Image (cartoon, rainbow, N blue to C red):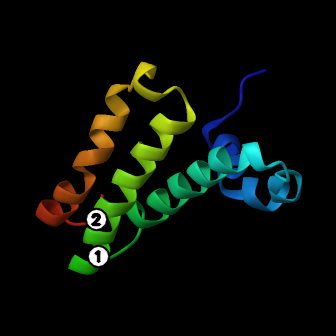
């Protein structure tokens, strides 16, 4: 059976609580940290209000996430999907239109 959107969201949100004790191998840390960066990005994007400092931090965090994603998942060989391109545009969308 497939997962509902609510179930996937719950797994995404609670993964650090569930799995953090199991990420003990050094080679797993970059992947885990990349996942935690994505969680922080999602937390910011779903915020109720934004300051310019928060939007600037979001820009920095997205750039760091994309850099570490490429390093973790294949260097220059990784195929970046359009969703990653949309991610880069979120700070300007928030600046121009307010919270999503």
Residue drawn where x is 46% and y is 28% of the image: 75
- Is the residue 95 above or below the residue 78 in the image? below
Q: Secondary structure at mark 1?
A: loop
Check disc 1: other Cα within 10 Å, few if <14, some if 14-19, many if 20+: some
- Give above or below for 87 relative to 75: below
Residue 9 shown left or right of residue 79 in the figure: right
Tell me, yes or no, if residue 51 can be seen here: no
Residue 11 place in picture, x, y as percent: 72, 47
Using the image, determine if residue 91 lies above or below residue 3.
Answer: below
Give the quadrant of the N terminus: top right
Disc number placed over residue 30 in the picture, else none: none
- In which image quadrant can residue 28 be found? top right
| Horizontal relation, residue 36 to residue 42: left or right | right
From the viewer's perspective, tell me whether residue 8 is left or right of residue 67. right
Q: Which residue is mark 2?
A: 99
Mark 2 Cα shell of 10 Å, populated few (<14), some (14-19), many (≥20): some
Disc 2 on helix, strand or loop? loop
Please report contact status of discs 2 and 1: CB closer than 8 Å, yes or no.
yes
Q: Quadrant of the C terminus?
A: bottom left
52 w.r.t. 71: above or below: below
Residue at 27%, 46% in the rendered image: 88
| Disc ID at residue 50 | 1
- Residue 26, position as x, y percentages in the image: 77, 50
* Residue lying furthest left: 96
Percent x, y for residue 83? 36, 33
* Front-most of residues 91 and 48: 91
Residue situated in front as seen by the camera: 60 or 52: 60
Task: Indicate which label's residue lies in the foreground, 2 or 1.
Answer: 1
**Percent position of residue 65, x then y:** 44, 50
């Amino acid at each position: 059976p497939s997962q509902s959107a609510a179930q996937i969201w719950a797994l995404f949100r609670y993964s650090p609580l569930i799995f953090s004790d199991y990420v003990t191998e050094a080679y797993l840390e970059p992947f885990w940290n990349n996942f935690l960066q994505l969680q922080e990005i999602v937390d910011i994007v779903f915020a109720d209000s934004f300051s310019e400092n928060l939007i600037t931090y979001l820009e920095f965090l997205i750039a760091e996430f994309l850099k570490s994603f490429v390093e973790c998942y294949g260097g220059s060989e990784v195929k970046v999907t359009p969703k990653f391109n949309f991610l880069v545009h979120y700070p300007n969308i928030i600046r121009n239109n307010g919270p999503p």
